[in-house]
Amino acid sequence: MSVESIELLADRCLLPGFTGTEPPDWVRRRAAAGIGGFCLFARNIVSPEQVEHLCSTLHAESPGLVIAIDEEGGDVTRLEASTGSSYPGNLALGVAGDAGLTRAVARSIGMDLARAGIDMNLAPVADVNSNPLNPIVGVRSFGSNASAAAEQTAAWVEGLQSAGVGACVKHFPGHGDTSVDSHLALPVVGEDPPAAALLPFRAAIAAGARAVMSGHVVVRSVDAAPATISAAVMTRMLRSELGFAGLAVTDGLEMQAITRELAIAEAAVRAIAAGCDLVCVGGGLADEATAISLRDALAAAVHAGSLSEERLVEAASHVSSFAAWRSRQPRQSEIPDREVGLVAARRALRIDGHVRVDDDALVIQLDPEQSIAAGYIPWGVSEPLAHRGVRISTVILRDARAAVERHLAEAAGRTVVLTVRDLHRHPWQLAIADSVLSRRPDTCGGGDAALSEEVHSHAARLDGMGEVELLELMNDEDGNAIAAVRAQIPSLAHAIDQIAGRIKNGGRLHYFGSGTSGRLATLDAAECAPTFGVDPQLVIAHAAADGEAEDDRDLGVSEARSAGLTTRDTLVAVSASGSTAYVLGAVEHGRTSGVLIVAVTCAPGSMLGRVADIAIEVAVGPEVIAGSTRLKAGTAQKVALNMLSTGVFTRLGHTYRGRMVGVTAANAKQRGRALRLVVDVTGAGETAASDALAQAHGNAKIAVLMLRCRLSTVDAEARLSAARGDLAAALGERRHA
């Protein structure tokens, strides 16, 4: 094949961006020369009429050109970047849970795009947001339930494509269980993409999705390379295993997940070789020189033999097949139903308590930096409230140094409305929200306060109670806490089963907590070794110091990283409020390490409970003294941790018939206890039992095996070791494994 022919094929595999609201000369020239397409951004759009003119100008140069855009609804919109989208994003649609409504929303978006002349929408996001601390997916996902996300993804694809615009489902093979933004660094998924993460992609393919976008993520057990440049992912998994035959598009190649390790031209060659068909670039590198360098790199790779000519031909043919499909779609004359966006948003709304906004209000808007994928999109409730006739003053806060007390003082007698974004991911927001809610409990729109912070129904009488009445009240409340723990037995049992299995395989148990929760976790961890005879390094407590340490998310991340967590370990996160920054930071790192996350909290529905694999959520209600989690919240956590560790080590055979056989006699009291235990379990006399204990160096399990099975010390030790310390198993008795 000639040099010119190879360059034409290489050009066909490019999807660059450009600046300006009119196509520059180089864009028109490259379009006429047969480039694959162009990706539009907010910088290219000022009005529906202008973007329609822009697209018609480009298509006039090349009818087979593919014009693409990110129009997800919600946070990610290009057509309505100056005002915010008319349509809710994926999470809102997932909360509404109506596939028909999702289909209608996507069809309306598709009609907007089709009327503008856009061919491909780089949407929907099909990632299952299994890590709520994910900084880039979040509300762009339909949620953390894979089956529900699959149903919603398929409906979105069907709705969009019914309007004649091709869907490009992203980010294959799943960006949901990551805690790194691929615009800034390379995320790593610890294990195989589970069947759950692939479910939405399978559903999208079954629904006829015309395109799939790669994710810049590493799946360690599949390939050390990012998915975009991995043939194991983009060819074997996507094409062979999932049966996808459409167009494979890269995520933006200039993102640092790729360019930190590779030159962008090399990345383009490796992406096409891996099975991608269309190289997307131009969010940052939006110039002709970039497009030419990528074309030349692809052509040179074919000549050098590092990229096969057949693969380049196949990639270009996939681009042309997509363009041909788009050309066969009827022109849209139907007017989009913009009301459907409002209907869907209302369906997703959740209201707790009595919400009333008077005619004069202060809006406190906590405004974290928005993701690169979204850019800055107007948001908040100030404008809608003003349209309803409310006199509004708005304070926008962007860090914890803001003097919120002054604003609240000035708002005396007025309604206070607090609006937040990604509250769980920003400790400064949590700090401000707590401050606002503690000073103005009547605030509208605030996040959930911990139940322990609420005022008890007997609080007004507390100071006047006699000692007996006060103690009876406290005792009653502790009894309620115990009952609340009992309601969590199914979750506790599930956690015990999972933790025991991991310890059997060489894992460790790590507690993370702060304040009272941290001290209770430390106590439980410290008691495991002397009670059950296990290695003191098997159960480890990590507790933040009192004061500001518990607000330090980075400290939690750092201490979890220093703990050397492995995929066999369990992280038990203990926080009465379910929102402690130190604990959430530890959990954030734990998820990247593949550990099992178990939450113990007294705040049902808290962020900690939502990020955990297993949530033990003990609803204790308001404390007798508001905010004092050393009372019944402490009782509940102590009981739950006791049950958890005792259940685990009983399951693992470190007790025997209700006795502490794991104890090693190290003092007079323990020697007496061990002697009585051995006599009781074996029926031997005190002299024989004492001799066996002496030979076993005080280890009651070894002494029991020696007497019951008539073994030498060495043989008894070997048998117990083979049974992984399980005395009943070493004795050959049947027991629950």
Image (cartoon, rainbow, N blue to C red):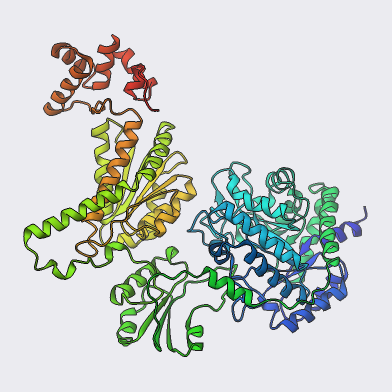
Residue 107 vs residue 703, the one in the foreground: 107
Q: In this view, does 63 lie to the left or right of 638?
A: right
Q: Is residue 200 above or below residue 645?
A: below
Question: Where residue 531 appears, x then y in whole percent?
Answer: 24, 33
- Residue 224 visible? The answer is yes
Q: In this view, does 459 lie to the left or right of 508?
A: left
Q: Which residue is drawn at 85% across and 67% down?
A: 327
Question: Where residue 524 appears, x then y in whole percent?
Answer: 26, 43
Give the farthest residue toward the top.
710
Quarter-of-image position of residue 609: bottom left
Residue 561 vs residue 499, the one in the foreground: 499
Q: Residue at x 30, y 31 (%)?
A: 534
Quarter-of-image position of residue 660: top left
**Which quadrant holds the C terminus?**
top left
Q: Is residue 396 left or right of residue 78?
A: left
Q: Which residue is drawn at 61% across and 76% down?
A: 85
Question: Where residue 484 appears, x then y in whole percent?
Answer: 29, 51
Q: In this view, does 525 lie to the left or right of 354?
A: left
Question: Where residue 640 appears, x then y in whole percent?
Answer: 29, 46
Q: In this view, does 215 lie above or below 533?
A: below
Q: How many labels does the image show?
A: 0
- Residue 711 visible? The answer is no
Residue 408 vs residue 403, the one in the foreground: 408
